[in-house]
């Protein structure tokens, strides 16, 4: 009896681990595309499935952080099975390009959809969705007239009133890079130092936690990404919903360069075995139908100008975007991290 | 002069003959296995000669002091808490009879099954605004109650509570196997129960406790998810910061080498200290079933309550929070594919646990049967993989195996990677990483086997294998089972390595949980996390039954 049980266990174990090697083996006969992605959203899985059905091309997905995916591609070299790389920020795409992992794509359809500041100058990568890094304030304690720009956050009046997450987060690094690009290195360092002085607590948690901290009264302002607020406002958790409803979104720098935005984007791998399928895949993700799904289920701003924003986003009104070319964010990323450390932003 | 020279040559010759005499097939076999295990570690080690990157100065100026301080605090605090919980609960469940003892005996292992970053999220959620903690206070009309546990102390608590089972498991295996008969002897000689425990059992349990503690510490120093969420910068934060944010893998490798030296140093100090004491010289192997002390009812309940504390903190509280989240998200997350995912995770963990225990066993005994001291010591290097962050191990695996894959492709033998992107690389990486988890309990249980028994068996003409199968195997079976369960659970929740090396279409529950959690959908991660716990329960219950039957 005992032995049969053992045997059964082993059989189940081996059976459940049977490799799907067939799908990668006959790559030439079966149409497929290998996607390395940092986006783990349900909207994406939905879209991949829809693409499979529509085009007959099988989508193989490897989910990991962009850094790990880039490292993997470097090691795999010419034999890398990756066709496209999807990241959640422009900086990482720039890094992939700098490491010679991507190839330029000239395609009139893609060019006509993606605005020029949301893609690589040489067409190595393209933005898929936008997110803005905004200030949220406690409705009951802050007069929005007092807010103006990121730079203004270092004002004395916000002493011990700001919460923001750690500097190891890429969204903060990109924001810092944009400030370096706009105000210069010295000013950026001073800004970071002064902001650390105004923090209500040492950086911890994620963006949602910052909103909760404002709602709970630990601070008056928080710097967060828009789509987290969208998700919180549609959350099934009462505490999250309450927290999100007690704050309001403010788009900074409307009087000058515009609010800092970043994109989640895509690039075709240099050694992509299925290059044509990859281009087809990208145009599919940029189509109005797909962009609508990004916008409605993930509360991101679509890059396709013909697609409307989700209702929540509409309620915040339209805003002026920083037109800085996003490649800059990648170029200045390392500098941003160094300045964060020097300024003592944990 | 001349004489001294010839003396020198003589001694050289002598050691050469010694080597020739002592070398046997076990030496080669040990070295071979060691090579397989150590290749990834050495690949990373070689990188050290490139020197640290340009950011090294920046890191050592601005970051290293606080990394060191935090890691040090964490190590100390976690050692204290895990020993406290692990040793006390192990002693109470083996020595005393009390209500729910059997259930608690295995429930004490289960906290290990929840990935520590999920425990961190669960506790943060528990004490957050609108959480369970706050709802207690709402009864008294206190609004916005919150306990901030997101600091180094909170982190130490969360990590300890999810890792103490390592200490519990190895301490319990020791207590079960032989402590009782020693204690009885001590009691017969008129020493009080408490004094015997403090003077006799605690010192004797040291190798077992330390073996568990080493695993705890390596895991603590390696933690990334929980520390990141709590905003506590540790050594591993530094590794990832220099690797990814500062784009300097060299500095990252330098830092992980430092970490490695630190951990290895700890192991060596312990081994050196232990050398003075001969642990295997206990004469009578315990064959009597150990009888549990039956105390008055109220004392039994007191004991039950004490043992419940770590179980409640490490299992019921996080699971309570996870269940609440699961209830809120099940319409969105729960679907049949989760079952398939559980099955896959189970299969992968089962295979990994099997091979890891096998490798650890082979390494342990081959090095024992071989006579060269150098190789005996070198076999300890096999445990190094556990001290390196999973993501770094993955790189260490990919570099050499890709060479083989690419060579095979160039030779026209294969068209697709044979090792990379298949289960081979994944299981290989797991074995490298978790060998220490299996090695430690095996080593400490094999230490207790009195050497004279296998020795006399060999004198009587039995071969190594036969001796092992007939004599040592039955004696270390408990240790083997613990090793299997630990590796199984560890594999179930492993993340960074799995993400990088997993084949397409193979997916695990841990990856699923991560996909949600990494996007701040912590609540949605609850259901996959609960599935991990359920899957982990299967071998724990099954093997524990086996263990109890053989007791």
Image (tube, coloured by chain):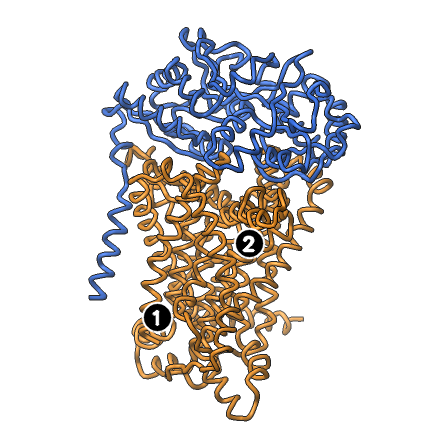
**Chain containing the residue with disc 2:** B
In this picture, is B1 found above or below A204?
Answer: below
Residue furthest toward the bottom?
Answer: B189
* Badges 2 and 1, same chain: yes
Mark found first going from the N terminus, 2 or 1: 2
Q: Dot 1 lies on which element? A: helix
Choose top left, top right, bottom left or bottom right for residue A254: top right
Q: Colour of chain B?
A: orange
Extreme-right residue of the structure: A156
Residue A66 lies, with reference to residue B459, above or below; the image says: above
Answer with left or right where residue A7 lies relative to residue A301.
left
| Quarter of the view holding residue B107 | bottom left
Q: Is residue B12 above or below residue A56?
A: below
Q: Nearer the viewer, residue B292 or B432?
A: B292
Element assignment for label 2: helix
Residue annotated with mark 1: B547
For disc 1, the neighbor class at 10 Å (few under 14, some 14 to 19, many from 20) is: some
Q: Which residue is mark 2?
A: B159
Label placed on residue B432: none
**Colour for chain A in the figure:** blue
The percent position of residue B312, horizontal first and vertical second, equals 49, 60
């Amino acid at each position: 009896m005992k032995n049969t049980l053992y045997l059964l266990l082993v059989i189940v174990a081996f059976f459940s681990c049977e490799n799907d090697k067939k799908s990668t083996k006959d790559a030439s006969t079966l149409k497929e595309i290998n996607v390395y992605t940092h986006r783990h959203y349900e909207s994406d899985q939905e879209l991949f499935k829809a693409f499979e059905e529509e085009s007959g091309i099988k989508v193989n997905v490897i989910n990991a952080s962009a850094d790990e995916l880039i490292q993997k591609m470097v090691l795999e070299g010419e034999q890398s099975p990756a066709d496209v790389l999807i990241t959640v920020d422009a900086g990482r795409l720039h890094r992939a390009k700098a490491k010679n992992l991507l190839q330029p794509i000239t395609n009139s359809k893609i060019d006509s959809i993606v605005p020029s500041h949301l893609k690589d100058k040489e067409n190595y990568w393209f933005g898929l969705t936008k997110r803005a890094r905004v200030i949220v304030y406690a409705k009951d304690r802050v007069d929005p007239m007092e807010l103006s720009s990121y730079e203004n956050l270092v004002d004395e009046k916000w002493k011990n009133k700001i919460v923001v997450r750690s500097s190891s987060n890429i969204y903060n690094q990109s924001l810092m890079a944009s400030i370096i690009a706009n105000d210069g290195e010295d000013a950026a360092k001073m800004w970071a130092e002064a902001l650390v002085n105004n923090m209500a607590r040492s950086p911890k948690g994620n963006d949602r936690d910052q909103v909760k901290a404002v709602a709970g009264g630990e601070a008056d302002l928080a710097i967060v990404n828009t789509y987290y607020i969208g998700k919180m406002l549609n959350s099934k958790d009462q505490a999250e919903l309450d927290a999100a409803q007690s704050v309001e979104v403010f788009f900074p720098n409307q009087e000058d360069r515009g609010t800092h935005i970043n994109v989640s984007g895509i690039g075709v791998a240099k050694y992509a075995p299925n290059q044509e399928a990859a281009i087809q895949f990208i145009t599919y993700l940029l189509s109005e139908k797909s962009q609508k799904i990004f916008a409605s289920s993930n509360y991101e701003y679509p890059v396709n100008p013909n697609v409307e924003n989700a209702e929540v986003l509409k309620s915040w009104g339209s805003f002026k975007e920083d037109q800085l070319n996003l490649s800059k964010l990648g170029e200045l990323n390392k500098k941003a991290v160094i300045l964060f450390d020097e300024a003592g932003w944990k | 002069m001349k004489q001294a020279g010839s003396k020198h040559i003589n001694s050289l010759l002598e050691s050469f003959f010694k080597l020739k005499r002592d070398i046997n097939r076990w030496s080669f076999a040990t070295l071979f296995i060691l090579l397989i295990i150590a290749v990834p570690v050495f690949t990373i080690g070689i990188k050290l000669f490139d020197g640290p990157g340009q950011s090294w100065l920046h890191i050592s100026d601005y970051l290293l002091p606080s990394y060191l301080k935090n890691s040090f605090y964490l190590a100390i605090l976690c050692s204290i808490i895990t020993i406290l919980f692990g040793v006390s609960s192990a002693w109470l469940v083996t020595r005393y009879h009390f209500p729910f003892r059997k259930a608690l005996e295995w429930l004490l292992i289960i906290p290990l099954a929840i990935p520590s970053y999920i425990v961190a999220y669960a506790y943060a959620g528990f004490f957050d605004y609108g959480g369970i903690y706050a709802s207690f206070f709402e009864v008294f009309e206190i609004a916005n109650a919150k306990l901030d546990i997101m600091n180094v102390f909170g982190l130490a608590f969360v990590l300890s509570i999810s890792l103490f089972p390592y200490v519990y498991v190895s301490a319990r295996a020791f207590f079960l196997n032989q402590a009782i008969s020693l204690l009885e002897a001590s009691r017969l000689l008129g020493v009080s129960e408490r004094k015997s425990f403090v003077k006799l059992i605690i010192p004797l349990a040291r190798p077992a406790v330390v073996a568990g503690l080493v695993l705890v510490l390596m895991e603590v120093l390696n933690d990334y998810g929980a520390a990141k969420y709590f905003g506590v910068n540790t050594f591993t934060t530094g590794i990832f910061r220099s690797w990814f944010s500062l784009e300097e893998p060299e500095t990252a490798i330098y830092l992980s080498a430092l970490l490695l030296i630190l951990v290895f140093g700890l192991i060596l100090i312990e081994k050196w200290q232990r050398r003075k004491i001969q642990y295997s010289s206990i004469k009578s192997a315990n064959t009597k079933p150990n009888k549990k002390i039956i105390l008055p009812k109220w004392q039994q309940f007191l004991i039950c309550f004490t043992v419940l504390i770590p179980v409640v903190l490490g299992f019921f509280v996080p699971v309570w929070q996870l269940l609440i989240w699961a209830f809120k998200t099940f319409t969105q997350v729960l679907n049949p594919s989760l079952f398939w995912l559980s099955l896959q995770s189970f299969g992968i963990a089962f295979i990994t646990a099997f091979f890891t225990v096998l490798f650890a066993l082979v390494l342990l005994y081959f090095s024992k049967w071989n006579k060269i001291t150098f190789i005996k010591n070198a076999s300890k290097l096999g445990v190094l993989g556990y001290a390196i962050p999973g993501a770094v191990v993955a790189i260490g695996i990919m570099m050499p195996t890709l060479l083989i894959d690419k060579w095979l492709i160039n030779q026209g033998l294969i068209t697709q990677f044979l090792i990379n992107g298949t289960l081979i690389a994944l299981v290989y990486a797991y074995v490298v990483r978790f060998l220490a988890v299996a090695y430690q309990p095996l080593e400490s249980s094999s230490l207790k086997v009195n050497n004279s028994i296998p020795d006399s068996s060999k004198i009587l003409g039995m071969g190594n294998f036969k001796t092992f199968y007939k004599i040592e195997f039955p004696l270390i079976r408990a240790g083997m089972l613990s090793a299997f369960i630990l590796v199984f659970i560890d594999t179930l929740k492993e993340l960074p390595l799995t993400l990088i090396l997993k084949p397409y279409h193979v997916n695990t529950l841990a990856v699923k949980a991560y996909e949600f959690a990494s996007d701040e959908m912590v609540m949605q991660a609850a259901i996959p996390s609960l599935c991990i716990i359920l899957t982990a329960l299967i071998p724990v219950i099954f093997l524990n039954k086996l263990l109890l039957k053989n007791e």
